[in-house]
Amino acid sequence: MDRPDPTSHPLYRVRHSAAHVLAQAVLELYPNARLGIGPPIEHGFYYDFDLGMDGDRPRTFGPEELDEIEQRMKRIIGENHPFEMRSASASEARDLLASQPYKLELVDGLDRGEVGEDGQELDAKVEITFYRQGPFDDLCRGPHVESTGKIPADGLKLMSVAGAYWRGDETRPMLQRIYGTAWYTRKELRAHLDWLEEAKKRDHRKLGKELEIFTFDADIGPGLPLWLPNGGVLIDELEKLAREVEFKAGYQRVRTPLVTREGLFLKSGHLPYYKDGMFPPMEMQGEDYYLKPMNCPFHHKIYDSRPRSYRELPLRLAEYGTCHRYEPSGDLFGLMRVRSMQMNDAHIYCSEAQFEREFLAVVEMYVGYFKLFGIAEFSMQLSTHHARGLGKKYVDNAPLWLKTEALVRDAMRAGNVPFNEVADEAAFYGPKIDVQIKSSIGKEFTLATNQVDFAQPASFDLAFINERGEREMPLCIHRAPLSTHERMIGFLIEHYAGAFPPWLAPEQVRVVPITDACNDFAQRLVERLHDAGIRASADTGNERMNAKIRRAQLFKIPYMPVIGEREVEAGTVALRKRDGTQIKDLTVDRLVELVVQKAAERASEL
RNA sequence: GCCCACGUGGCUCAGGGGUAGAGCACUUCCUUGGUAAGGAAGGGGUCACCGGUUCAAAUCCGGUCGUGGGCUCCA
């Protein structure tokens, strides 16, 4: 923790205090409401409420009720109640909490189990503090502003209502969560709301539709994307990139089927540990077949298709494999979370002595990719197991978990790669390094991943013959630096705001003839570009050139050679680039040369 | 999966108990115009689906499906 303490930030206090004011406002308007928790968050704050039952369903807030609550908050701010802190011992705190009928932790029946849990938490603390403003008193570690009047009323806005499980546990009752945002001034609030609007403009779901990259169809099913021709180009280019990079790095390409007998996934451990994430089985002649959620067992079988010598290691098997996972309906999110995906997958089988070098080579590979794409904002996370999940979520072998986690940690340190460690996020078969990125609207996703697997080589009884003629088990590294096509392209759409670099752009050149008289010339130019391997077309419609240029701009096409009578006569074009700049009197030869060169340079600008 | 909201032509959206609207896109015609929308005419929707209420439902009610926000982090 070398970051500055966030609680010292003045907006943290404002937001935290606003959460208390929100709770007070809700209690004034809904005296029977009970409180969950209410922390400050990135752009504001939230508070959880239980409104009791309405017949056999929980009572909820409608969006129209947010206005009323917000007005009440502003009134409380106007009343300028001071925030008064006081300390209490554990037993005093428990008595105080018991005197607050609205605190959820202590309500009879609903959450008795929590009383003990919280009691223990209370005992463990040296000092317990309460904050009171006006009639509202809350267990809270603070800090707050001096009084409610210090919260800028016109920098405050309630944003949304959402359901949230008490303590994040889906077996617990669902509470009503109100989100708000808070800033110093109306102007800052405005800027934040504008930023949200801007972020929506580069949302891959919106751009993906506008740029005709992908679509979904209800007849096909949720989470099952259809790639339109423009998306097909992006996929082809990414695969071409992966093929080249992996070839140089000594990978071999393989292909494996989409379905398999149940036995394979029993052996791999997927069925015991991963069943919920899989589509249900298909029965055929008394036998169950499954759609694969991962490629690893197939690659293990390829490894195991004949005896292996230490001389063959590291053996690197790569495949852009198509996998299907039954993600919960509420988790689906555009291209970022889907049920059908094509993964930039590969498995590296190596000896323990080779592990560090191989693991770091993979880390370097994705750092190289990120550099190529200009992705600067990402973080690496070492995801480890949790002792409580052994046997349920994770393969039950504590010593191997500790050993492989240490291997990864050491490799990362040896390579001087910064990372942070998060418990209880590992794959069921081993620890992993996840590369975390944010979507344009701020949602965090794992883009690339690099995982160690000690479990499956054992369950598949994989082996190689070492230098001494003995059978030895290899380690397996699973890696997917380019993620899945779905998530990678979803991310790249947002990263480039749809303006892909020339090598990736679905259409690289749109020729704009000014009059019909120039159409033949334009058509011949397109043919030349096609011959050179460039994705080009001509807009030979009968609109004015302005409309043609506008259309090409909207599709964010990098190059727009404009052709009028002058150009036809001179055998040149007037090249307009996507950024609006122009190069006049460019000969056709020079144009083709320029575009071919730019399209070949993956890191190039316009 | 759960809570909330939304679902009107290909797209963006207005309307709203009494025989469906706009702009863009599409088709045709006119226009041949130098760097982000030339003009006119035309075609296109059982208002997501199923059921209920009503003399009458796109509109009200219920269910289903789909989409979005949230439910993990953000101490």
Image (cartoon, helix red, strand yellow):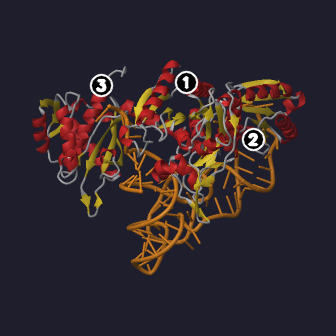
Q: Earlier in the sequence, mark 3 or mark 2?
A: 3
From the viewer's side, name the closer residue of A559 and A486: A486
Q: Amino acid at mark 2?
A: Arg
Distance from disc 3 to disc 2, alpha carbons, whole Å, reads 56 Å
Q: Which mark is residue A356?
A: 1
Q: Is residue A524 above or below residue A106?
A: above
Q: Is residue A80 visible?
A: no
Q: Which mark is residue A20?
A: none
Q: Indicate the position of residue A551 as horizontal and vertical percent values.
A: 69, 41
Left/right of residue A478 with respect to residue A23 in the rendered view: right
From the viewer's side, name the closer residue of A262 and B11: A262
Q: Amino acid at mark 3?
A: Pro
According to the picture, the residue beneath numbered tag 3 turns out to be A10
Q: At x 76% / y 24%, what residue is drawn?
A: A583
User: How many tags in the picture?
Assistant: 3
Secondary structure of the residue carrying tag 1 is: helix
The 10 Å Cα crowd at callout 2, few under 14, some 14 to 19, many 20 or more, is: few
Q: Amino acid at mark 1?
A: Glu
Q: Indicate the position of residue A548 as horizontal and vertical percent values.
A: 73, 40
The 10 Å Cα crowd at callout 3, few under 14, some 14 to 19, many 20 or more, is: some
The answer to whether tags 3 and 1 share a subunit is yes
Q: Earlier in the sequence, mark 3 or mark 1?
A: 3
Marks 3,2: beta carbons within 8 A: no
Q: At x 82% / y 34%, what residue is drawn?
A: A529
From the viewer's side, name the closer residue of A270 and A72: A270
Q: Indicate the position of residue A1 as horizontal and vertical percent values.
A: 36, 22
The answer to whether tags 1 and 2 share a subunit is yes
Q: Can you tell which of label 3 and label 1 is closer to the viewer?
A: 1
Rendering quarter of residue A147: top left
For mark 1, name the chain: A
Left/right of residue A598 with respect to residue A45 in the rendered view: right
Q: Which mark is residue A544?
A: 2
